[in-house]
Amino acid sequence: MNFATLTRSATAIALSVSALTLISCAGGPSYAEAKSTLPPIAKGKGRVFVYRAGSFGLAYKPTVQIDNQDAGTLYAQGFFYSDQTPGNRSVSIHTEANHVNTVSVKAGQPSFVQCKTYPGFLTPHFIPNQVDHSTGEAEIQDCKLAE
């Protein structure tokens, strides 16, 4: 292989990785930008913010379910929200393994679910965990709204 061919191959790979990065991340405004423009929490409901601050496994965008209903897509460095009935709700993410955790939802209040990414055998594992309000607010600031 000559230098020109090697350079073209390296350029093609770099462009492909760049394109994949752009389509694999959420593209809306950051939480910090969007927070004041979000609609009020629905009456008698609580708001669940689900976020993924990291970019490990960025090509994977699993669907997150709350009580076995699709709630949103989990993008690298992204977040979404879902208004839910108060009580304990099941949050699950399925890739090569199904990871489930419980989030406590209170009427009129936000709850935060942090999704950490870990290596798996074939695909990354995404593990949802409820965090306290101050941790969630701090970690979600730069995450982009998945629209």
Image: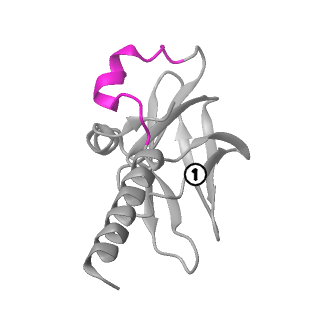
Q: Quadrant of residue 98?
A: bottom right
Which colour style is shown?
A: one colour
Drawn side of residue 100 relative to residue 28, left or right: right
Residue at the spot x=38%, y=65% of the render?
A: 13
What residue range appears in magenta? 26-41
Location of residue 42 with respect to 68 vertically, above or below: above
How many dots with numbers? 1
* Residue 40 percent location from the top left of the image: 48, 14
Q: Return the x and y of residue 60 as percentages of the image width and height.
A: 53, 58
Residue drawn at x 28%, y 37% is 141
- The residue sitting at the right extreme is 68
Does residue 99 appear in this view?
yes
Q: Left or right of 137: which side holds 43?
A: right
Secondary structure at numbered mark 1 = strand
Q: Nearer the viewer, residue 42 or 95?
A: 95
Q: Is residue 56 above or below residue 22?
A: below
Residue 25 or residue 67, whichever sits in front:
25
| Picture quadrant of residue 38 | top left
The amino acid on which the numbered mark 1 sits, given as a three-letter code, is Thr
46 up-or-down from 20: above or below? above
Q: Say which residue label 1 marks.
A: 102
Where is residue 115? Give x, y as percent.
46, 54
- Position of residue 137 measured from the top left corner of the image (x, y, whole percent): 31, 37
Q: Is 30 contained in the magenta span?
A: yes
